[in-house]
Amino acid sequence: MFFVDMPYLSDFFKQTVRDGCIPVVGTEIAQKMGLYDGTNILSEEAAVEMVRAIDSRDLRIYTTSENAIGWIAEHLSFSDLPEKIALFKNKVKFRELMKPIFPDFRFLEIKLEDLKNFQLEDFPLPFIIKPAVGFFSMGVHKVTRREDWFPTIDVIVEETRKNKTLFPEAVLNASSFIIEECINGDEYAFDAYFNSSGEPVILSILKHTFSSDTDVSDRVYTTSKEIIEKNLADFTLFTDRIGKLAQLKNFPVHIEVRRDQGVLMPIEVNPMRFGGWCTTADISFMAFGFNPYQYYFSQKKPDWFEVLRGKEGKLFSLIVLDNSTGINVNDITAFDFDRLLSNFEKPMELRKINYKEHPVFGFLFTETREDNFSELKYILDSNLAEFVSCSDTVP
């Protein structure tokens, strides 16, 4: 069964669950998400009974949004699913889980109210600080110098105030933070699931490109034939180690890692979903023609040799149009999407988001020739202010 929740469902996902007769739990939120007529809706009561009755090895649950974690915790507490989710959703618990593989990795948990009393001498610089329960790079900061610490705290406090109402506490809770050592190397994000035997199946691999060493934003993720072929075997083995530690079966994940001289270090594992906002799974279909949602539900594996055929020299990118303008959202009157699209040689899909309600203007999926990476570099370096129109009160 699949769970749908705010903030977003793609048309591709809606079509997938309807045409594939995949049961969708009919929560109050699900009834407001614009699912297509003919979708197989499962009542909440029937969903609970199904979990009670079906062997966990045959039960496949997927969530489009971590907002659904609260429903699972409340209604499926008799199962081991909430405990499995907490192993990954809470970043402190996740680091504890990873200790057998990375015993020397340094991290600690600290409360929001204790940040100003934290002694920098107790942890080597540079380090990353982020909410222990977080989402979408919200509240993530890199501290490289002692003089950066107190200004960073001020920013964190303000972000906490602003983001408090955006997501439920099960998704974003900035009352507690994790401070951890910086992880070096190239960053990747990928979707996978553990099948009924606990075997990992990789469904995507995207390289996360940054504009600078201090950049921690989600702007450009790119997949290609070369990126997948170079990493598939190692990422599969790495995912298998995680699955064995947590004893996972029928469990979808979105994993972020860094690779430094061949060594893989996990950043985080997001449970019960692929990339948020129906992004990374959808781009796998746009780029390579297979449906990750259906593959998970049907326990299928991509034939990577076949799906990568003819994809030489092509880059497929997910561009997150996050509001990094520095302009108060209340002063922004419009975003020029036509001007944005004119900068790309082959846009595949543009998804406009209500930027008054969410910290993004939209998501853009593109195909780019490898020798035209400059168009991706351009949007990577832009704060997007050039595309917005503002009220007369903004100079």
Image (spheres, helix red, strand yellow):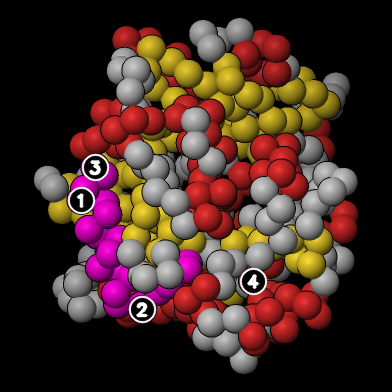
In the picture of the structure, the residue carrying the numbered disc 2 is 247
- Structural distance between the alpha carbons of marks 3 and 1: 6 Å
Q: Position of residue 292 (x, y in %)?
A: 51, 46
Q: Quadrant of the C terminus?
A: top right
Give the mark nearest the N terminus, 2 or 4: 4
* Residue holding disc 1: 234
Residue 231: give its label: 3
Q: Amino acid at mark 2?
A: Gln
Query: Which comes sooner in the sequence, label 4 or label 1?
Result: 4
Residue extent of the magenta highlight: 231-251
Q: Provide the secondary structure element on which disc 4 rests.
A: helix
The amino acid type, in three-letter code, at marker 4 is Ile
Above/below status of 175 relative to 327? below
Q: Secondary structure at mark 3?
A: helix
Q: Is residue 37 above or below residue 102?
A: above
Q: Are marks 3 and 4 in contact (CB under 8 Å)?
A: no
